[in-house]
Image (spheres, rainbow, N blue to C red):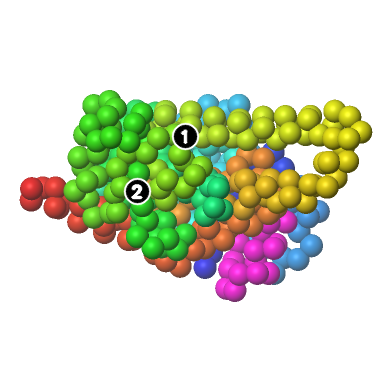
């Protein structure tokens, strides 16, 4: 199993990327990793090169670059070369914590879409109260969507949750303004009809307030709504922890109370930690592509690597393509 990783992507690159890769090759049997980036910056952290190769380049795509233009003009950028490794068969999948839009462009131009996939989806796994988490797609790859796109997201999410996350008969919900059938916009009403007839465990509409309660294993929405929901969840979590910390630091008594519940608060924080869930999959491409969080530490990179490995081992890409073909055929027969 071979992975290509953009060593220069993310706030903590290349240190976090290299250390995460080292942990992965020591933990995952048969894994080989190619790091793409500046050797002078990578080598100080690469204390063991067993099963790790480096492709040297000094060019990279930054957070400020315009995605499509950067991918087309910066031919030697670490992210572009990463996608090239996959396209030319030297890697089975790839990972980057860099510019999200650029990774989408590199994936589309460099790797290509699966047959039958109209638009790939960006799909992170988010935490729930019971610790199981749920998959949300799309969260920003496509701000405009059609009903058939949401149907494809539902099928893709169901396959990934079953194959990689090990969820038996994943419950698929459609994010909406109410749980009743017939609620929402023309987009959600039509998508509801399509999902109800699809070969998935569709449970109907779910509301945003119920997401973290584990209302569904897969939550489907358009990229605009999904991105707003994702950032609202992230912002609320950060604000709540900041408020809790401020409350406990108010006086001597509250500081004593904080010391008594320190371990419990740490456990709660870990339960909400994005790094334990890997990265967001760019589903619908011809190979596994994982977008790690921009602020990923080595633990997050390691989990993103495990995520990519599971996708490869379980032939998720092939299963998505074949299932979508069956759905399209059934739709044509109807």
Q: Residue at 39%, 63% (x, y): give it.
A: 168
Tag 2–tag 1 contact (CB < 8 Å): no
Residue at the extreme right of the image, as rendered: 252
Of the numbered discs 2 and 1, the one sitting upstream in the chain is 2
Instruction: Using the image as rendered, state which of residue 217 and residue 295 is in the foreground.
Output: 217
- Name the foreground residue: 68 vs 178: 178
Residue at 22%, 50% (x, y): give it: 198
Would residue 23 be counted in the magenta stretch? yes
Q: Measured from the top left, where is residue 164 in percent x and y?
A: 45, 61
Name, please, the residue furthest toward the bottom: 29
> Which residue range is magenta in the image?
19-38
Which residue is located at x 14 percent, y 47 percent? 331
Q: Which mark is residue 172?
A: 2
Q: Is disc 2 surrounded by few (<14), some (14 to 19) or many (20+) residues within 10 Å? A: many
Q: Looking at the image, is mark 2 or mark 1 nearer the viewer?
A: 1
Q: Is residue 41 above or below residue 46?
A: above
The image shows residue 128, relative to residue 53, as above or below, that is above
SS of the residue under disc 2: strand
Residue 294 location, x and y as percent? 63, 39
Number of other residues with Cα within 10 Å of mark 1, as a class: few under 14, some 14 to 19, many 20 or more:
few
Q: Residue 165 magenta-drawn? A: no
| 190 displayed left or right of 208 | left
- Residue 132 shows which numbered tag? none
Disc 1 on helix, strand or loop? helix
| Residue 50 visible in the current orientation | yes
Could you tell me how far apart the alpha carbons at marks 2 and 1 are, in whole angstroms? 16 Å
Per the image, the residue denoted by label 1 is: 209
Q: Position of residue 81 (x, y in %)?
A: 54, 48
Q: What's the residue at 64%, 57% (across, down)? A: 302
Which of 128 and 302 lies nearest the eye of the viewer? Answer: 128
> Is residue 122 visible to the viewer in this orientation of the structure?
no
């Amino acid at each position: 199993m071979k992975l290509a990783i953009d060593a220069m992507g993310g706030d903590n690159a290349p240190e976090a990327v290299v250390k995460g890769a080292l942990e992965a090759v020591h933990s995952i049997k048969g894994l080989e990793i190619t790091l793409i980036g500046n050797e002078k910056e990578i080598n100080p952290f690469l204390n063991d090169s067993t099963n790790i190769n480096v492709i040297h380049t000094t060019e990279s795509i930054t957070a400020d670059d315009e995605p499509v233009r950067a991918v087309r003009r910066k031919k030697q950028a670490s992210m572009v070369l990463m996608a090239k490794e996959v396209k030319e068969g030297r890697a089975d999948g790839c990972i980057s914590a860099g510019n999200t839009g650029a990774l989408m462009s590199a994936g589309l131009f460099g790797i290509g879409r699966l047959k039958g996939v109209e638009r790939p989806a960006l799909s992170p796994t988010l935490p729930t109260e019971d610790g199981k988490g749920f998959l949300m797609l799309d969260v920003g790859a496509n701000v405009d969507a059609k009903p058939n796109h949401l149907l494809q997201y539902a099928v893709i999410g169901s396959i990934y949750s079953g194959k990689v996350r090990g969820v038996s008969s994943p419950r698929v919900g459609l994010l909406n303004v109410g749980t009743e059938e017939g609620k929402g916009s023309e987009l959600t009403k039509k998508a509801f009809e399509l999902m109800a007839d699809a070969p998935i465990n569709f449970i109907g509409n779910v509301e945003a307030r119920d997401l973290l309660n584990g209302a569904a294993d897969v939550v489907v929405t358009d990229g605009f709504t999904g991105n707003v929901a994702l950032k609202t969840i992230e912002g609320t979590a950060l604000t709540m922890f900041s408020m809790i910390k401020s409350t406990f630091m108010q006086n001597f008594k509250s500081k004593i109370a904080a010391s008594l519940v320190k371990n419990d608060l740490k456990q709660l924080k870990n339960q909400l930690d994005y790094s334990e869930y890997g990265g967001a999959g760019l589903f619908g491409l011809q190979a596994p592509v994982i977008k790690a969080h921009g602020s990923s530490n080595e633990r997050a990179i390691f989990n993103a690597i495990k995520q990519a490995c599971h996708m490869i081992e379980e032939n998720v890409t092939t299963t998505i393509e074949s299932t979508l073909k069956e759905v399209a055929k059934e739709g044509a027969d109807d």
